[in-house]
Structures are given as C-alpha cells and as structure tokens.
Amino acid sequence: MINVGFIDVQILIIEVKQLLLYIISFFPLLVSAQTQVTEYNPGATADGVVYALPRTVINADVSAIKTEYVPGEFAKYAERYLHIQGVKRQPETTWTVTGLSVYTEGEPDTLKMFTIKQKDKSSAANVQFTRNGVLSAINTEQEFESHILPQSTSTHHARDGKKYLTAEMLEASSSAKMAELVAQEIFDIRDSKNTIRRGQAESMPKDGASLRIVLDDLDEQEEALMQMFVGYTDTTFVYENYSVAPTEDINKEVLFRFSQKVGFVDNDDLQGEPYYITVTDKHSVQMPNEKEAAKRKISGVVYNVPGSARVLISTMTTNLYDQEVKMGQFGNVDILNNALFNKGAAPKVTFNTSTGALLRIE
C-alpha cells in the first residue's frame, strides 16, 4: 500500500508540473490579448529582409491668419482731433483661412508586408526604407521629399505711447483734454520732421546717420501716440495638418472645422464651418478575382500598381481642391522577376514611397 501511494504521489507531481508548464506557455497569449501599440521596424530577420508597401495618405496643410485689433484709449476722439473717420472702438478678433496645400505620403500597409529572403547569389535584399518602413529602393538610395509644417508666428505692433506724455498731458482735467493735447503733440512732431527734411531746423544733425536717427526717433514717437487714437493690430500665422488614408470611397467627410471667431476647432464643434473631403476610387486598375488571386505565386519583389482616385476638398459652397491622385490602396500589385537580381546582377530599383509604384530600373 505504501508503494502504491508513493507512485500515486509521483503521478500527481508530474501532472502538476505539466499543468504549470501549460499555464506558463499560455501566459504570453494572455499578455498579448491586451492592447499593445508598437512602431513597425523593418529590417533583417533570420530569413531575410521584411518590408512594407505603402498605403497612400492624403495630407492637407492648412494655413490661417489670426487678426487681433486693440482700440486706442482715445478712439472716440480720433475724428474730432485728427480728422480720422471710422476708427473702431471695440476690440475685434477674426480668423481667415489663407492657404491649402495637398500632398500624399506613404504609411506601411499592414496587409502588404513581405520578406525578401537572403540568398548568396541574390542582391534583392539590399534595400532602403523610408523612416516609417516603406520600401524605397533596392541596390541604391533616393532622397525623400520632406514636408515640415511651419511653426506658428506672431507679429506684435503695440507701442507705449504713455512714455511720451508730458506733464501737461498727464495733468489734463479730462480725457477729452488729454486727447486734444496728445493730438497737438502729433502735429508738432510732424512739423518737426518736415522742418528737418527741408533743412530748416535751428540745430540740424551733423551727418546723414545722425539725421536718420533723429527722424526714426520722431517716427517712433508719432506711431506710439497715434496708437492711442487708432489702436493697433497684431497678427498670428497658424498652420495645421489634417490627413486621411481611405481604404474605400468617402463622401463629404468632415476633414476639419474652422471658425472665423476662434479658428480651428474640433470636428464635433458646430461653431466651426465644415471643410469636407471626398475620395472616389476611379477603378482605373483591373483587380484580380478571388480565383486569380489564389493562384498568384509570390516569386519576386512585390510592388504596387496604384489606382487613381478623385480627391475633392470643399466647403458648403466652394471647391478648394479637385485633383486626380494616385493611391496604392486603390490598385493592384505586381512582381519583379527574381532573375533580375540573380547571378551577381545588382540593378538599381526605385519606388514611389507614396504609392508603392515602380519608378525605374537601372
């Protein structure tokens, strides 16, 4: 009985070990079931080189200008003392779209990833990739066109007119009286500039450089004091990028929204006017049926034969961009024969990194 129990215990231990090994082997599957996002990195593997063909991305770089008007503190006296009409008395901010630049680039298409197997007598594995892993060239290199979105910039025009106010101005009994004295100072500055330019000033600058310094200083004073009446306007140049990589037709999808009061807003913010994008596959490339696709044997380097699509960007009333664009995902694929790269041959092959099309073989 003792020997039988010992054997039973051994069997139990073996079964527990097997269970633990099963759990351990299954654990990576449990971990991988969680959401993971990693950057695709092409390159050499045990079998060769892994590469991806591109899915074409439509990019729209949109430029806009923000204009901020700040009224002067004497705005209401501008017409009375300076005879300037229509001076605004309230601050105002407006936004305007000033430009739209549309271009394409390629991103790795996870449905079109291939391995070029490394063989001693083949040069096909000598490849170049774009930064995001799209096949660019074999046995050569090509330069990539880079699109860098400009940084937003602002111009500031505010001048401090108060530092030019005299004691008499500061002691004025009312804002109207102060405005009158400031206006008179502006006219005096203009008279001084005219006198200097005519060479009639009692103490003229000794040389041209000194003359320029004096006139520049008077110009600065005049501008600063004038802003106390007419205000000033600051401008900010803003740039945004919007992109879409359609896998099928899209009809008037909101690309972005823009408000003349606050600028670029979220796509669900209805205070912004919608800017739409429509992409229509023109079916310019014949696609294989399922039977033909099943028979196709990958016997060489695969590349895209891109199709054409009509890309339209519009508002509710105006078409802003309407062009035919080549897109990798709306086409077919073809294969470079392995014989091109065998027996010491090293042809230079380049591909369009936006569409995956074959550019040239040298």
Image (cartoon, rainbow, N blue to C red):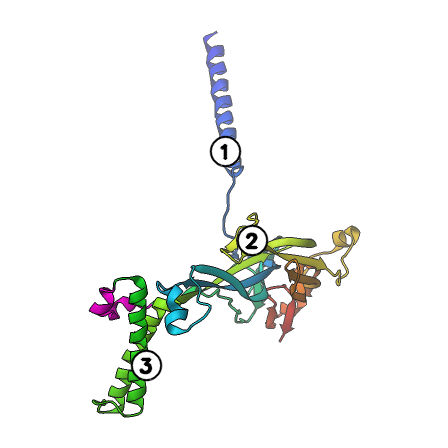
Q: Please name the residue that numbered disc 2 is placed on.
A: 272
Quadrant in the rendering for residue 340: bottom right
Seen at 57% across and 47% down, the residue is: 268
Is 75 on the left-hand or right-hand side of 333?
left
x and y, in percent, of residue 245 in the image: 61, 56
Where's residue 229, x and y in %?
37, 68
Question: Which of disc 3 and disc 1 is earlier in sequence?
Answer: 1
The residue carrying mark 1 is: 27
Nearer to me, 244 or 275:
275
Q: Regarding mark 3 in the picture, which secondary structure is present there?
A: helix
Mark sitting on residue 190: 3
Q: Secondary structure at mark 1?
A: helix
In the rendered image, residue 160 lying in the magenta stretch gets the answer yes
Q: Residues within 10 Å of mark 3 (few under 14, many from 20)?
A: some
Between marks 3 and 2 in the image, the one whose residue lies nearer the viewer: 3
The x, y position of residue 90, in whole percent, is: 43, 59
Query: In what element is the residue under mark 2?
Result: loop
- Amino acid carrying label 3: it is Arg
The amino acid marked with disc number 2 is: Gly
Q: Is residue 226 left or right of residue 12?
A: left
Residue 242 can be seen, yes or no = yes
Distance from the alpha carbon under mark 3 to that under mark 2: 46 Å
Inter-mark Cα distance, 2 to 1: 49 Å
**Of marks 1 and 3, the one in the foreground:** 3
Residue in view at x 32 percent, y 72 percent: 183
Q: Residues within 10 Å of mark 2 (few under 14, many from 20)?
A: some
- What segment carries the magenta color? 159-172
Please say whether residue 265 is one of the residues in the magenta stretch. no
Give the quarter of the figure containing the C terminus: bottom right
